[in-house]
Structure formats: structure tokens, C-alpha cells
Amino acid sequence: MNKAERFLAACRRQPVDRTPVWMMRQAGRYLPEYRAIRARHGFLEMCRTPELAVEVTLQPLRRFDLDAAIVFADILLPLPAMGLDLAFEKGDGPAIRNPVRTAADVDRLRPVDPTEAIPYVLEALRTVRRELDGKAALIGFAGAPFTLASYIIEGGASRHYEHTKAMMVADPAAWHRLAEKLADVCAEVLGAQIAAGAQAVQLFDSWVGCLSRADYAEFVRPHVERVFARLDTSAAHIHFANGASHMLAEVRAAGGDVIAVDWRLGLDEAWSIVGHDRAVQGNLDPVLLLAPQDRLEERIADVLRRAGGRDGHIFNLGHGVLPMTTPENVGFAVERVHALSRRTAVADAGDAT
Ligand code: CP3
């Protein structure tokens, strides 16, 4: 079975010859070849130039035996088309210079046509899909309504999400209108990415873990359900809610063929809450990639042991690769996942055909 087949079979909870593996932020600053391009180009410029985005998407696949590629882009790229002024300031991360704070601000936000808003992402997907040619699966992505709203309302990264939570409480109607608009953006963007060749799409709810379970159920879940309900089922749907161990049953109910989990619960416990009728993705703590290789291997083996050889596990980190990680340890981890998870029966069956 080729790598794309291995990854997609695991998304569908079908047997695989070994556990497929990819890593969130597998393209990025920990790779010297990424830094070499980044030294000459701005981050947004890289995203908006398909030749550069394609090159950076493929960099980790040239080094490592990864089963999937994730297109090099960002969850915030569709925002300018809504009327938001997005910038990446050196060292400070993303900024929205005209944040949304009132109902009138929400009403001013425009719907997004992905072919106009992010044509360069769609072009990068088409090119990468052609170049991969089954050698790895291709993943597209979008930010989930809550995570996008947190950037739009706070104006950038946040510690306490005070303006976002304040809008939910003080003006729930405005919050729901905003989240609905963002759910439409997610569905449009992911739909266009699937049409451009993405074989799986991941919805990133990176900061939703700051909410209580009750607030998630009331203010977030209906909007995430709306995204997944609108997506073409020819692609696999991956739902990543970071820091959400306290509400995994709600996250599962919101949708996704694959529930991606962080490292805060053991994979066995997380999977039993999610339910074995869904696939899971995860969940090595990214900090373990900074540890000595014998410790790293022990923890990889522990994640695989907790997955229990059950169909429907995709190995990943609980969050993104940290910039100080060495490429050597990423390569070691990918090789160990495949070696430690080899299934003789499926491998032999595959070899025989
Ligand atoms: O390899 C991949 O995973 C694909 C590329 C990818 C990027 N951003 C590239 C990037 C993906 C999937 C994202 C998603 C993204 N972007 C998320 C969700 C994932 C997560 O980490 O939870 C979020 C919250 C963002 C918003 C964002 N973009 C932030 C907060 C930052 C600054 C923080 C940082 O890491 O510097 C970015 C910039 C960014 N996006 C970089 C990369 C490689 C670093 C840019 C640089 O080179 O300076």
C-alpha cells in the first residue's frame, strides 16, 4: 500500500501495514532549508507565492518518510477578503489592525469566495497533488470558527481571550452571527481545497480549550457542526481541538472522521471518550522531540501501545513541531513509528497482491 493509501485507510478505520505519521507544523523554522527561503521572503509573501509554498510543503517530505503533506499556508489567510487588515509583525506573530468588537463590526464582515481570496493556496494544492502522485496524502486546512474569532476579536494572539468571551456573554446574538459567518468561510475554504486536490482537511481549533464544556456546547459546537455538515465526504475530515480533554465528547459530537487529540490525556483514555467508531490522530507531546532519542523512543512506543493496534490511528504530535527541534529527531521519530507499528499480516497481504 502506498503512503497516501495508508493515511487515508487509517482515516477510514481500515487496516494498514503500519501506522501512518505526519506532524503538525512539519514545514517550518526547525528546517534549515525553510529558514534559507524565509531569510529572503516575508511569511505572507511565501504563502502567496505558489512556487515557494509548494517548495516549502515538500521540504519535509524529501527528508522524512512522512505519510502526508500539509499545504504550506495559514489559517488567517482568508481574513483580508472579509475586510480585516492582517499583518505578520516580525517576532510578534499575527496582528489584525481593525479588530471586531461590536455587532456593527460583525455586520461589516464580507463573505469569502476562496477562488478570489486564496487562489494561491488552491494553486499550491493542485501542484503539490500532482507532484506527490500518491507518494503521500495531501492535507488542506482551515481555522475553526472559535480560533479565527479569537484572532479577529482580540486583534492577535491572546492569553485570556477576554474580548472574545466578553462578546459571547454580553452580546450572544453578535457572537453567533460572527461564528456563523466564520463557519461559512471555513466550509467554503475547505470545500475549495478539496476541489483543488486535498484528500483530507483538518479544522484547527487551536485555542478552544480556554472554554468551559458548557460554553463550548452553547457557543461553538453548533458552528463546527455546520462546517462539517457542509463538507464533501470524498475527503477525510480531521477535527483538532487543542486543550480540549475536558470536553472531548462534545468535540466528537461536533464532527470529524478523525478526532485529533493533544497529549494531555493518554491516547487510550482519549480514544475511549471519543469512541472507537471514530479514528484518532495524535498525541506525542512536541517537547519530547527535544529529548534524548532513547526517551523519545519510549514515549513513541507508549503512544503506539495505547493505540493498541486498533485500526484508525494516525500518529502525530499533540500540537506543532517546536522551532528548536532538530531535523534528526523528527526523522528518528518518523522511522520509529513505522518500525514499531509494522503489522505483519497486512504487510504480507499487501506484498502478495
Ligand atoms: O507545516 C504545517 O503545519 C503547515 C503550515 C501551517 C502554518 N500555520 C505555517 C506557519 C499551518 C497548518 C498553520 C496553522 C496555524 N496558523 C494555526 C493552527 C495551528 C496551531 O499551531 O495551532 C494558527 C493558530 C496559526 C496562526 C499563526 N501563524 C500564528 C499564531 C503564527 C505565529 C506563531 C509562530 O509560530 O511564529 C503564524 C505564523 C506561521 N504559520 C509560521 C509558519 C511556518 C511561522 C512564520 C515564520 O516563518 O516566521
Image: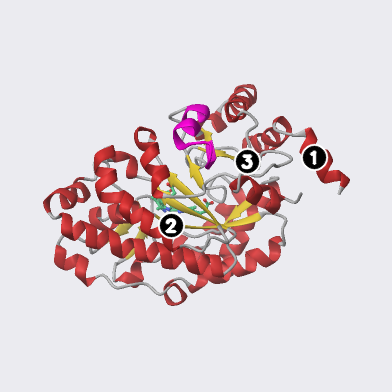
Would residue 160 be found to the left or right of residue 125 on screen? left
The alpha-carbon separation of the residues under discs 2 and 3 comes to 34 Å
Would residue 248 be found to the left or right of residue 266 on screen? left
| Residue 249 image offset from top left, x and y in percent | 39, 38
**Seen from this angle, which residue lies furthest left?**
170
Q: Determine if the magenta segment contains residue 225.
A: no
Which of the two labelled residues, at mark 1 and mark 2, occupies the earlier sequence position? 2
Q: In percent of the image, x 43 and y 77: which residue is there? A: 116
The alpha-carbon separation of the residues under discs 3 and 1 comes to 28 Å
SS class, disc 1: helix
Q: In percent of the image, x 39 and y 66: which residue is there? A: 78
Mark 3 surroundings: few (<14), some (14-19) or many (≥20) residues within 10 A: some
| Residue 310 image offset from top left, x and y in percent | 62, 34
Which of the two residues, 290 or 218, is positioned nearer the viewer here?
218
Please name the residue that numbered disc 2 is placed on: 228
Extent of the magenta region: 266-282
Residue 266 bears which disc, if any? none
Residue 327 bears which disc, if any? 3
Which of the two residues, 43 or 263, is positioned nearer the viewer here?
263
Question: Is the CB of the residue bearing disc 3 within 8 angstroms of ligand 1?
Answer: no
Above or below, 43 relative to 350: below
Q: In percent of the image, x 30 and y 54: which residue is there? A: 151
What's under tag 1, amino acid-wise?
Ala
Please name the residue that numbered disc 1 is placed on: 347
Which of the two labelled residues, at mark 2 and mark 3, occupies the earlier sequence position? 2
SS class, disc 2: helix
What's under tag 3, amino acid-wise?
Pro
Question: Is the CB of the residue bearing disc 2 within 8 angstroms of ligand 1?
Answer: no
Is residue 202 something one can see in this rendering?
yes
Q: Nearer the viewer, mark 3 or mark 1?
A: 1
